[in-house]
Image: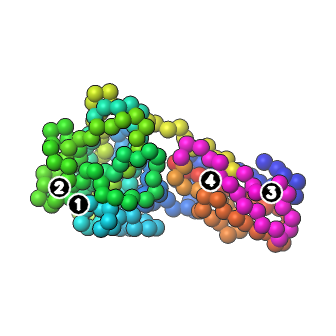
Amino acid sequence: MKKRSFSIWLACAACCAIHAQPTFELTDLRYAVHLCSDTAFIPAQDQSMIGEVQDLSAVNRGCLLANEQQSVFVRFSVASAGLLAFAVTPTEPSDYDFALWGPFIEAVDTLEGSPIRCSYAALSGATGLSFQALDISESASGDGWVRHVSVDAGQHYVLYVGNYSLNGIGFHLHWQLEDGAALSCPGLPEAAFEPSVGTVGVGEEVSFVDLSTNDPYGWYWEFPGASMERAPTSSRKASRMLPLVAMMCG
């Protein structure tokens, strides 16, 4: 895109891993990936207990008394109604816990209430939602399995999976769908933005409005004073050219 007194170059990445500067940790809900199929996770050995913010507290953690423990947040949405369960299976013996929030009418970046399913079982091995379990939440004395959920098309959910063992061991997330249930697979994010003005003079301020589609979870704008805000503002006082790389991730 080119506009008279300044130029803008746009680069879009479908995956943040190809760009070294921003760090979007899955330990933060705001950067949770949207899943629709079985997925393997391997936490980084130096992964922090929490990311940029602490998403869990006594208000919303439910049975997870230890809050966030070498964790991953993921999102999923429902394409068709039915019954949903899943299994979290460590690749080596480890104590994994989880919690599930929803349903929501759209993707959320904060959790204001208790989870609808929760397991804090002090066991090493697989855990998750089961079609045989009857309880919906369990303490450390639980068996690692709580009841499946009935889902409807258009609903959104947030899943937290935490490694209480803190040993860096990864896990596999396996979905179990019955009675017609299916997960929605969104398209890759497409970057788009719009400057607040068409012509920017030297020293003037310009704002950028994000118009990206398919629910990106992170934004990175590269210019002097790089920003990870969704709609940043920049001012150039000594140049007539404004080079900009906008990257969004999903």
The span shown in magenta is 194-215
Picture layout, residue 247 above or below residue 53: above
Mark 1 and mark 2 in contact? Answer it, CB < 8 Å: yes
Q: How crowded is mark 3: few (under 14 residues within 10 Å), some or many (20 or more)?
A: few
Sequence-wise, which precedes: disc 4 or disc 1?
1
Disc 3 from disc 2: Cα separation: 55 Å
Question: Which residue has dot 2 on it?
Answer: 138
Of 52 and 205, which appears nearest the observer? 205
Q: Where is residue 230 in the image (x, y as percent from the top left)?
A: 60, 58
Query: Whole-percent x and y of residue 60?
Result: 32, 62
Whichever of callouts 4 and 3 sits on the residue coming sooner in the sequence is 3
Q: What residue type is labelled 2?
A: Glu
* Residue 86 highlighted magenta (yes or no): no
Residue at mark 3: 197
Which residue carries the number 1 mark? 63
Q: Do we see residue 118 in this rendering?
A: yes
Q: Is mark 4 on a helix, strand or loop?
A: strand
Q: What residue type is labelled 4?
A: Met
Label 1 environment density (alpha carbons within 10 Å; few <14, some 14–19, many ≥20): many
Q: Could you tell whether 173 is left or right of 154 in the image?
A: left
Could you give the CA–CA distance between mark 3 and mark 1, rounded to whole angstroms?
Answer: 50 Å
As helix, strand or loop, the secondary structure at mark 3 comes to: loop
Identity of the residue drawn at 63% across and 65% down? 227
**In the rendered image, the vertical position of residue 120 relative to residue 185, given as above or below:** below
Distance (Cα) linking label 4 and label 3: 21 Å
* N-term-proximal mark, 3 vs 2: 2
